Amino acid sequence: MHEALLYEPLDHARVRCGVCARRCVVAPGGCGICGTRMNRDGRLFTLIYDRVSAVHLDPIEKKPLYHFHPGTAVLSLGSFGCSFKCPGCQNGELSRRAPVEDDPALRVLTPAAAVDAALHVEAAGLCWTYNDPAIWLEHTLEGARLAKAHGLYTAYVTNGTATRAHLDLIGPYLDAYRVDIKAFSPAAYRTVAGFADVAALLDGTAYAKARWGMHVECVTNVTPTINDADAELAGIAGWIVDALGPDTPWHVTRFHPYEGFAHLPATPLATLERAYALGRAAGLRYVYVGNVADDPRQETHCPACDAVGIRRSGYRAVSDLRDGACPQCGGVIAGVWG
């Protein structure tokens, strides 16, 4: 095991973890809600420092990140555990599983080895995803430092629970923060994620951009009866405009029934169209419809002249931008093109 970062000692050998907004108080012999950080005699240790459950070479569009190095491949890494308890999680076999020491389902991959692997397969960057990277800080921090030293970009695909202290550690080395904004009201968030401190999630996301200049893109999986009301969707869109800026991409994606939400229907296309319209009405310049095959709203248009700057089919992207500018009028398309 590897001693954890960001924890403080309390009385009776308890500790308070500070990597995510849960801020779990952990008794000796116990773990936080993520199941990956164990208290041993008043010291907190991570069980997943150099343990991975999934390694894949993905197009960056799969994350989805649409305004961040389009058309590049990224090495994606995941482990076990999560700070959320989402009933309909598509990666539940990873996020809900608590690791044990010497877990045979986890293979050893040090941060240095992860960077070497990315270079070997000629990936443009490293991305921590599948389960939430906030609980994997000891690995992601070291990996991000090494990645930047070798000219690779870095990205989190996250539920947004990283604390400001967490973001201050990794901020100098993390380029992109692709965050789920699952709802806007505490009641809806509690239903979809088992967590209701919406303010902490929004604060961390805004801080990632304002303090550390991370490229931020937001995703809302529009789930019928839970977060599909106009008030929820308009609330999210308005917050993005106010806190992150109108150039921040917002992906409104189709929900598919799964596990604890298997009784719900898939998101009607009309609902996604409504979410798209609410986003544009709020002032967002880049709203995308996701999990719908070849929807024209997956293309990137120039906000000045409406010309198509990036065409997408599935996870394939073809960019006509010229140094981040519209090929038609020369207007700037916000993003990290590189």
Image: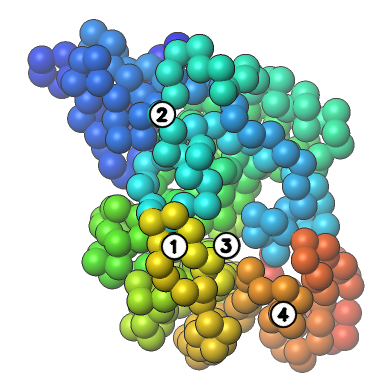
Q: Which is more toward the observer, 68 or 243?
A: 68
Tell me the CA gap for discs 3 and 1: 27 Å
Residue 195 as seen in the image, left or right of residue 305: left
- As drawn, the label of residue 200 is none
Q: Which residue corresponds to the image point at 68% horizontal and 20% vertical from the top-left?
A: 112
Check disc 4 and give the amino acid type: Asp
Q: Which is more toward the observer, 324 or 96?
A: 96
**In which quadrant is the N terminus drawn?**
top left
Q: Is residue 236 above or below residue 153?
A: below
Check disc 1 and give the amino acid type: Ala
Residue designated by label 1: 262
Q: Secondary structure at mark 1?
A: loop
Closer mark to the observer between disc 4 and disc 3: 4
Q: Secondary structure at mark 2?
A: loop
Residue designated by label 4: 295
Tell me the CA gap for discs 4 and 2: 37 Å
Tell me the CA gap for discs 1 and 4: 24 Å
Residue 72, can we see it?
yes
Residue designated by label 2: 98
Check disc 3 and give the amino acid type: Glu
Residue designated by label 3: 217
Q: Dividing the picture into quarters, in which one does residue 45 lie?
A: top left
